[in-house]
Image: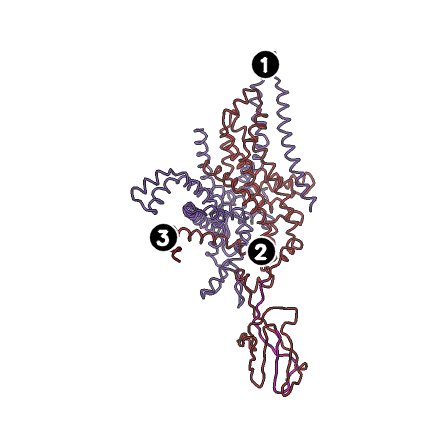
């Protein structure tokens, strides 16, 4: 056990050392290939230029290599595989896409994904904004923020166990030890098996992600709210605006850009949501989403890379508009820099 | 009382509402985690007997028992008496009530004689001792069936943790998680920092394109990478004659998947460093390598810290990459993976699930509360600036 940790730390040290060695050594070699002799000014300046041309690529090399192998190549390969059969050997044209179009499981996943997309980003942003506004006005606001922010540190699997315990159902006359059913029975209702209640169970799963992500929205929005100039709000107060009007007509329009960032960030997260559905229901009782369906087809019956690739591409297609928007924003920032 | 009302007036009703709503939200957010924390230290039997929110009070349980055989009856004066204790198998607790019919298991309060009819009386004391008497000899060969309402004081124990750590494999999984996380958190930093420096302070054709590529790759779903990489790993494994599921494989995968965000975050920070410092170092004849190592790297510490916290939380909490690139054997299953497996195999055993869940969230929570400042700073740099 201990030896395993020691070897992990060893790997870390060796890994860092090898990386450092690469950068150091490649720099040395570059300098050796293009020497800067003291006497020869033309050669010196030409070689300095040559160094300046090559050096960025030495610095970028390892990062680009990793990005290329693990992200760029797979995107292309997945696209190509989507036109091939389950083993990725025989070209099948659009058969996998046709399958997806008519498959009821696929349609169910699309429907659920849309449901998630409609609810989770909106709920997180709304709660995040409300909590940010409320906590900014009280002296123990930072403690409250810490607590709402805390689930961010908890894994989706851990959060699923936490919430599964809340949704726990016990049959017969057993005492309900799940909080939700205990409350329901306390009010005189009948305990329910929340997780296997078609359609509504989606919402019980969404609550988990909302619980985790609201803190993220709150932190970002709180910072944006603090950036609103004091005078703007004071002017509104003098003009006789009440709290409600200040919130909707002054604060929200001022931080509109940040709200969009929070919204899109959570949207991307929702599209990739996998762990929660896997651990809570494994897609049973009509809770399947695209990411889980994709995983399912990756291994089901030895794996079907064609169908799996199609599902991955659908997720990618949903992310693409946000990706383009992000790139344009980043370019605009760089232009101003 | 007066002070409270004056204080209330000073605070004002709307303000009070704000305090109360925030308090409500905080409790709402805390309760789920509190639930598993409390449950994980409760006695196994009590977890199923009562909700965790009653853990600090005594839990009350209805159970069935049997009185002594008629053969143990002794004649005392005119009556035949059976004495004994309802707690025989090492149980303990306080008897609150008892009954003789399942429909009314708590018909009689403890400590007072109950008239059962046909000349029979039964008294059960709170400590479990009972006296069962009849004005004629007892009949039959088996003891009488009775029902008891027993309250037991709260029992807190670390047994659940001992069980999950040493017999459910969570201890080993913890080590495995550390094995994955330590190198996968540290190694990307250096690689990303060099790239971020090049993208901030070096001029070369294609720079804008690479920055756009990095920004774009941040949001590419992991799902896009899985199939080709799995095939690639299998081929490499076959070629080298080793398993395709190795720690080296997952270290590289996590390093690469963390790379876009790392480069982006670090570039935002490094590009914002004061121009004068870097230019004057250049004028002094320092090479880019020296500038990076001696000036940029030390100055970027806050950004490096932010990113390493992100990467740590992401790698530690990851399930998808771990189940695709690592095996499910004892020596490779990480915490999230074993927790997921336990959910399947130990579905109703909450003493095991809650303790395991708490072990898995312990380290990230410690990191979170210890280094929250850097985490928030990183989030803000990553989202507000980018948007």
Q: Position of residue A161 (x, y in %)?
A: 55, 54
Q: Is mark 1 on a helix, strand or loop?
A: helix
Give chain B's shade: red
Frontmost of labels 2 and 1 is 2
Residue placed under numbered mark 3 in the picture: B9
The relative height of residue A74 versus residue B31 in the rendered view (above or below) is above
The relative height of residue A48 versus residue A100 in the rendered view (above or below) is above
Parent chain of label 3: B
> Is residue B150 located in the magenta-colored stretch of the structure?
yes
**Chain drawn purple in the picture:** A
Extent of the magenta region: B128-154
Left or right of A144: which side holds B187?
A: right
Q: Position of residue A4 (x, y in %)?
A: 68, 44
Residue placed under numbered mark 1 in the picture: A43
The relative height of residue A161 versus residue B376 in the rendered view (above or below) is below
Same-subunit check for callouts 1 and 3: no
Q: Position of residue A169 (x, y in %)?
A: 52, 62
In the depicted view, which residue is nearer to us: B142 or B204? B142
Frontmost of labels 1 and 3 is 3
> Is residue B379 located in the magenta-colored stretch of the structure?
no
Labels 2 and 1 touching (C-beta < 8 A)? no
Which label sits on residue A25? Answer: none
The quadrant where residue B4 appears: bottom left
Residue B170 visible in image? yes
Q: Quadrant where the C terminus of chain B lies? A: top left
How packed mark 3 is, by other alpha carbons closer than 10 Å (few <14, some 14-19, many 20 or more), is few
How packed mark 1 is, by other alpha carbons closer than 10 Å (few <14, some 14-19, many 20 or more), is some
Q: Position of residue A155 (x, y in %)?
A: 55, 48
Residue placed under numbered mark 2 in the picture: B354
């Amino acid at each position: 056990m201990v030896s395993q940790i020691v070897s992990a730390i060893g790997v870390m040290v060796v890994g860092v050392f090898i990386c450092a060695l690469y950068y150091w050594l490649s720099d040395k070699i570059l300098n050796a290939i293009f020497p800067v002799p003291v006497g020869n000014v033309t050669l010196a300046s030409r070689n300095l230029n040559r160094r300046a041309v090559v050096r960025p690529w030495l610095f970028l090399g390892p990062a680009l290599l990793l990005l290329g192998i693990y992200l760029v190549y797979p995107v292309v390969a997945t696209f190509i595989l989507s036109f091939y059969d389950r083993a990725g050997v025989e070209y099948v044209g659009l058969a996998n896409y046709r399958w997806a179009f008519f498959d009821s499981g696929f349609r169910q996943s699309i429907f659920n994904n849309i449901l998630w997309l409609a609810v989770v980003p909106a709920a997180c942003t709304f709660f995040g904004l409300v909590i940010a506004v409320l906590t900014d006005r009280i002296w123990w606001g930072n403690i409250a923020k810490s607590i709402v922010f805390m689930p961010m540190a908890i894994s989706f699997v851990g959060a699923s166990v936490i919430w599964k315990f809340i949704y726990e159902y016990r049959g017969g006359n057993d005492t309900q030890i799940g909080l939700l059913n205990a409350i329901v029975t306390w009010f005189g209702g009948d305990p329910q098996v929340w997780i296997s209640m078609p359609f509504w169970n989606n919402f019980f799963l969404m609550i988990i992600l909302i619980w985790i992500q609201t803190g993220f929205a709150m932190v970002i929005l709180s910072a944006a709210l603090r950036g609103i100039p004091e005078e703007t709000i004071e002017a509104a107060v003098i003009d006789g605006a009440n709290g409600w009007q200040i919130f909707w007509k002054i604060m929200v329009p001022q931080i509109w850009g940040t709200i969009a960032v929070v919204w899109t960030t959570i949207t991307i997260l929702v599209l990739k949501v996998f762990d929660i559905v896997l651990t809570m229901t494994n897609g049973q009782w009509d809770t399947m989403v695209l990411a889980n369906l994709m995983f399912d087809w990756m291994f089901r019956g030895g794996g079907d890379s064609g169908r799996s690739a199609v599902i991955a591409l659908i997720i990618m297609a949903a992310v693409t508009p946000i990706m383009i928007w992000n790139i344009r924003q980043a370019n605009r920032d760089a232009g101003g820099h | 009382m007066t002070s409270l009302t004056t204080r209330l007036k000073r605070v004002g009703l709307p303000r009070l509402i704000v305090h109360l709503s925030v308090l409500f939200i905080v409790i709402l957010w805390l309760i789920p985690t509190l639930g598993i924390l409390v449950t994980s230290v409760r006695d196994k039997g009590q977890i199923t007997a009562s909700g965790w929110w009653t853990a600090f009070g005594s839990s009350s349980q209805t159970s069935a028992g049997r009185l002594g055989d008629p053969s143990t009856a002794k004649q005392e004066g005119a009556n035949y008496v059976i004495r004994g204790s309802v707690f025989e198998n090492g149980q303990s607790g306080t008897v609150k009530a008892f009954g003789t019919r399942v429909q009314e298991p708590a018909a009689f309060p403890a400590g007072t004689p109950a008239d059962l009819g046909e000349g029979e009386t039964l008294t059960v004391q709170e400590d479990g001792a009972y006296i069962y008497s009849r004005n004629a000899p007892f009949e039959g060969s088996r003891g009488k069936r009775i029902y008891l309402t027993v309250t037991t004081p709260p029992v807190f124990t670390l047994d659940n943790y001992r069980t999950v750590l040493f017999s459910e494999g969570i201890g080993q999984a913890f080590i495995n998680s550390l094995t994955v996380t330590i190198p996968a958190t540290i190694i990307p930093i250096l690689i990303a920092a060099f790239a971020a420096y090049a993208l901030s302070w070096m001029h070369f054709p294609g720079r804008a394109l690479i920055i756009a590529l990095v920004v774009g790759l941040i949001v590419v779903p992991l799902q896009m990478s899985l199939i080709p990489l799995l095939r690639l790993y299998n081929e490499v494994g076959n070629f080298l004659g080793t398993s395709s599921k190795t720690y080296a494989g997952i270290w590289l995968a996590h390093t690469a998947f963390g790379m876009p965000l790392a480069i982006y975050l670090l570039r935002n920070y490094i590009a914002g460093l004061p121009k004068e410092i870097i230019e004057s170092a250049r004028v002094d004849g320092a090479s880019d390598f020296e500038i990076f190592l001696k000036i940029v790297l030390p100055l970027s510490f806050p950004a490096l810290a932010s990113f390493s916290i992100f990467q740590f939380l992401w790698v530690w909490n990851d399930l998808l990459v771990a189940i695709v690139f690592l095996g499910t054997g004892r020596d490779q299953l990480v915490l999230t993976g074993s927790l997921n497996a336990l959910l399947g195999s130990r579905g109703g055993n909450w003493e095991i699930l809650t303790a395991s869940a708490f072990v898995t969230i312990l380290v990230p929570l410690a990191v979170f509360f210890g280094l929250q400042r850097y985490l928030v700073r990183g989030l803000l740099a990553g989202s507000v600036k980018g948007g």
